Image (cartoon, rainbow, N blue to C red):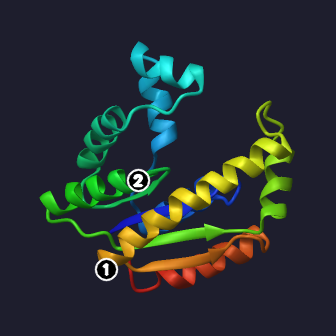
Amino acid sequence: MIILLFGAPGTGKSTYGRHIASKLGVPWISSGRLLREVARQDERIAGFIDSGELVPSEDVERVLFERLAAAGSGFVLDGYPRTVPQARNFLRFLQERSWRLTRVYHLRAPDEVVLQRLLARGRDDDRPDVIRERLRVYRLETEAIIQVLREAGTDILEVDTSPPMEEVKRRLDASLEGMA
């Protein structure tokens, strides 16, 4: 059972990723969280993160694929892939192990809902102009990745995360029936 979660910042990837992983009894793996853990021992990766730069794909994939291989053929992954080449590399990684991507959940919420959620968490870089730019870039990058996954025959389920959390969880639970 291999599940990918896509969603702009503020759509609930971590919240719903943990929920789905718990329901399925598989690990939840966040690429961002994993890279922050690795950065504690790896000065090179820490340098990218501390400067606000994206960690190069080769480094992300080295760390992430090692963790995914250790998880076996069942996990919920969020935060990766972020580019079309990464999507293709991920599909190749799965294929090399004869694993299959079970489903992609594309979490969505209106920009204003996302804006309010991110402003509420109070991080220094969560300003309206910065958030709107992140959303714009996310949409540009993600549309192409979703297309690559669709072409690979992946089941993609669009999920509106603007309703209350318990309602979204009920919808996710219903979508998981028969998958576990």
Q: Position of residue 139 (x, y in %)?
A: 60, 61
Q: Position of residue 127 (x, y in %)?
A: 83, 40
Is residue 72 among the parts visible in the rendering? Answer: yes
Q: Position of residue 73 (x, y in %)?
A: 25, 60
Q: Secondary structure at mark 1?
A: loop
Q: Which disc, if any, is residue 165?
A: none
Check disc 1 and give the amino acid type: Gly
Marks 2, 1: nearer the viewer: 1
Sequence order check: which comes first, mark 2 or mark 1?
Answer: 2
Instruction: Classify the position of the C terminus by image quarter.
Output: bottom left
Q: Check disc 2 and report the residue beneath it.
A: 27
Check disc 1: other Cα within 10 Å, few if <14, some if 14-19, many if 20+.
few
Q: Which disc, if any, is residue 153?
A: 1
Name the residue: 67% across, 55% down. Answer: 136
State left or right for residue 136 relative to residue 34: right
Q: CA distance from mark 2 to mark 1?
A: 24 Å
